[in-house]
Image (tube, helix red, strand yellow):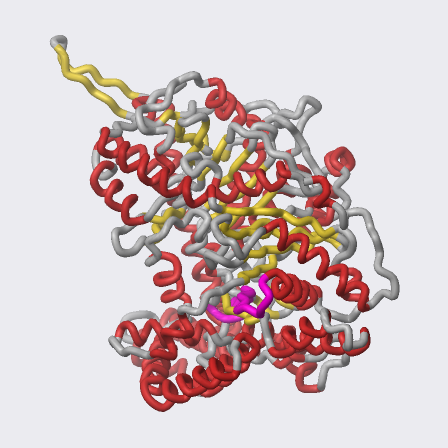
Amino acid sequence: MAEAHEAVAFQFTVGAEGVSVNLSYDVFKALLYSGLRSWKLRCRRTMNSLYNTMYPGHPLRGIAWCGVIYGLNIKGYDPSYGLIDWIESHMFKRYFTPDNSKTLACIVFGTGAYIVLVQIHQSALKRLFSYHGWMYQEHGKKMGFGTQLWGGLVKLLIGRNPSLYSYQSVLPTLPLPSLDDTLRRYLRTIRPLCNDEEYQRMVVLAEEFKQTVGRKLQRYLWLKWLISTNYVSDWWEKFVYLRGRSPIMVNSNFYGLDTAYIRPTKIQTARAANAVCAAFQYRNELDHQNLKPLMVQKLIPICSSQYERQFNTTRIPGKEADKLIHYSDSHHIAVYHNGRWYKVFMYYQNNLLEPCELQLQLDAIVRDTTSPDYGEKYLGALTAGERTLWAEARQTYFSTGVNRSSLEAIEKAAFVLILDDEEYDIGVEMTEKFDAYAHSILHGKAYNRWFDKSLNFIISKNAVVGINVEHSWADAPVSVQLYEYMIAEDIVNFSYDELGNTRGTPRFTALKPIKLKWSIPEACNDMIEKSFVQAKSLYENVDLHVYIHNTYGKGFMKKCKLSPDAYIQMALQLAHYRDSGRFNLTYEASMTRLFRDGRTETVRSCSIESSQWVKSMDDPTVTKDERVKLLRDACDHHQQQYRDAMTGKGIDRHLFCLYVLSKYLEIESPFLQQVLHEPWKLSTSQTPVNYDDKHLKKLLAKHPEAAAKYGVVNSHSLVPLGGGFGPVAADGYGVSYIIATEDLIYFHISSNKSSPETDSKRFGKGIRQAMEDMRVLFDDQSHNVDGLNEYTKI
């Protein structure tokens, strides 16, 4: 196994016989090729930035436009109405020959005119993207003439063959809601949560806020809206994520699990090699901007800014606030195995390693019998504990020497790969091992993850994949897209040989993995142990359960003419009301990426309509038809709220920004204090399924043998098991769900064992019962389908 000094390209020693010089040519060449690749990447990014600035125009079309202007001028036509002659006489005539001065004047006029036309084009697109009436069209009904006209103009002006960031400059700015509208919506959402006295108190506080400091804060917020691309996102990242001093493990980071049906290999290093190479391939697509921006209804682009920090990003702890550091490029990954950290280069002679070449390095790591350095095994626990403790340890013990070099190797890595020492059991049936798998990917043993890195890819001993994601840089849909791409490339494109190893023959003997060296003093090790104790206490309190609902899914919900998301949210409302005996503040995440730099907004799922329906379900005096009507009303209202949130008419981000301003201005507001400290007893999120069907179809056509071998027919064959997050409230639930197929839904339910009010398995049973009770509303007979008794297996 290579030692740390092998990473150094140039060494010299002074002895009795003089100076001895030692060059490591392999590393020296690797550094040269690394520099060459970085310059190529920088040039490509500059060119892409130019293209994106001009889009939907193009520099080549601009050159052609200048050629047309020049040709018309030569033929005696003056499209500039004398402006070309003016430019020639005032700028070029005294310095150049008549022919050259005329050519330059045509180029200047043509370039300026083309830029103006592009600006008009972009301004028109921005105005068109600001229209959201299409979203409120009733599903299944013909669109109105105005919406049809709008759609035709968008198709005409949207351009062809955009790159990932082409639409960034034409995305509209997140609108700032009026104070009156936000307060009115807020009061409506809390009505089912309060008795009459509590509600009247909040009405008085809201009115007092509006008449006193509210208007002032709104004016300041309008100024921020005026000068920023998004009035929420920077403060959301800073105050919600980076200012938090509690551990990010469980509290912030989220996780994703493997595919449901396919186990392509049981060889850990083979699966890891394929997954890592697929991730780097995806990173190359991002760097070259070959990925297409995601489109809503294949017509409206959503913001792509979150992709920028997906790789080569780390969170740096601070005493008062953390910061995110993104490196423009990285040529290696950091690998953790059996208590030891390694640096593994991913390029050799400017070529990305093939999976078979990477597997050789990972096999060497697994075979390595070197003992971890003192303090190395539990070092990752520093990233799992309280942030202030980690900041103090980092500043004191990792700012110089070998510790700094080794820490930089982890922090500057593209991402972290964990070769775990456990085996995971997954599938489509609920077992204790399935829950243990979700536990492991969420928090592991606290010390065997690096929670500060943007991405931790985790490969079990029996080759099951998981991903742990640091939350501050982006939201789940961005990571899901990477994960789905990686799984498709892993199984269909790269695939495995008959023995389960990676395919292909190594082209060369690449650099050996470098074991990182550490010099951990006793005082630092004490801090590591203290952080580990904090983290261990936190993760041992997590009650995490994966409930698999396999009796029916979105197919049935659509037949009932109900939105699947709204249907599931109502099921959660019914289950939670029965579980807690009261209505509680409920959070559902909605995206605001229709706007530039947009992230999320809150949909308050507990509403007047949902509470009326929930009460009716346990009221024997209410008929089935009345319950169905109440359910439809609740789902319709939920969809309306979701649309409002997506189009910038949400409640909570607006109030959050007003609260931040009140703190900056040192203004006390009892209303904002009350609003911002209300606990979210039920926090929910849907994991999207974003499969790029075009990409998958190409892979299936190119590799029919792999598709047949693993039974991959379409995206449903590779559907992931979803993922989840820790509970938001100490006495509440966190629920993430993925609508995997027409008849399969995974619910990831988290809570705290210390709370006497919650129990994740009990809540899973409640969801099962609620889903079955809802189906009975549309079916005369209650079906006793296999799968409803899964809990008897646990």
**Residue that protrudes farthest toward the left in the picture:** 16
**Residue that protrudes farthest toward the top in the picture:** 17
User: Can you see residue 80?
Assistant: no
Q: Closer to the camera, 759 or 218?
A: 759
x then y, percent, for residue 638? 63, 73
Does the magenta run of residues contain 583? yes
Examine the rendered structure and indicate whether residue 373 appears above or below residue 99: above
| Residue at image point 69% right, 79% down | 137
Span colored in magenta: 580-596
x then y, percent, for residue 633? 70, 78
Q: Closer to the camera, 423 or 227?
A: 423
Relative to 726, 430 lies left or right: right
Image quadrant occupied by the N terminus: top left
Relative to 395, 704 lies left or right: right
x then y, percent, for residue 249? 43, 47
- Where on the picture, by quarter, is residue 428? top right
Does the magenta run of residues contain 6? no
x then y, percent, for residue 785? 82, 51
